[in-house]
Amino acid sequence: MSDHPALRVLVYSDDALTRRKVVSALGTRPHPDLEIECIEVATAPVVIRHLDDGDVDLAVLDGESTPVGGMGLAKQLTDEIDDCPPIIVLTGRADDAWLAKWSRASAAVPHPIDPIQLTQEVVALLRAARG
């Protein structure tokens, strides 16, 4: 059993299948010393509410979501929320990483989602945030 409570990872996409792929890739223990709980969200206002409340340790935002894409949402969140948690943006393709950088996301992972790459990014960002 871990000395730390489960870290909360928000997963935003308007596509339920994309949310399930992210949650499935991460599981509940992406690394032996990290336990996570995923919060699935389908709309931007709910994402904003969770991050405003400060109850999220990391957010995974789907850049392909409509009507509000994850990249624009990432930029809004990093601009407006003090102590914004790390954000990973899921991009439409690897060549879109520059857009994720513009959005001030902490990292970008392209579609189709590679579970190993996504998990590595999540673990690295959660460890860095936790200190």
Image (tube, rainbow, N blue to C red):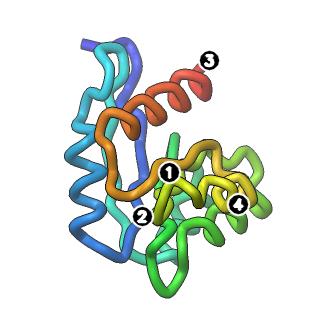
Instruction: Give the mark count.
Output: 4
Distance from label 2 to label 3 (Cα)?
25 Å
Q: Amino acid at mark 2?
A: Tyr
Residue 29's disc number: none
Residue indicated by mark 4: 103
* Circle 1: element type: strand
Q: Is residue 29 left or right of residue 7?
A: left
Task: Give the residue drawn at x 39%, y 40%.
Answer: 118
Placement of the N terminus among the 4 image quadrants: top left
**Label of residue 59 in the image:** 1
Separation of disc 3 and disc 1 at Cα? 18 Å
Q: Is residue 104 visible?
A: yes
Q: Is residue 25 left or right of residue 87?
A: left
Of callouts 1 and 4, the N-terminal one: 1
10 Å crowding of disc 1: few (<14), some (14-19), many (20+): many
Q: Position of residue 29 (x, y in %)?
A: 26, 27
Labels 2 and 1 touching (C-beta < 8 A): yes
Task: Give me the disc on residue 12.
Answer: 2
Q: Nearer the viewer, residue 7 or 109?
A: 109
Secondary element under disc 3, as helix, strand or loop, is: loop
Indicate the position of residue 16 as horizontal and vertical percent values: 24, 70
Q: Earlier in the sequence, mark 4 or mark 3?
A: 4
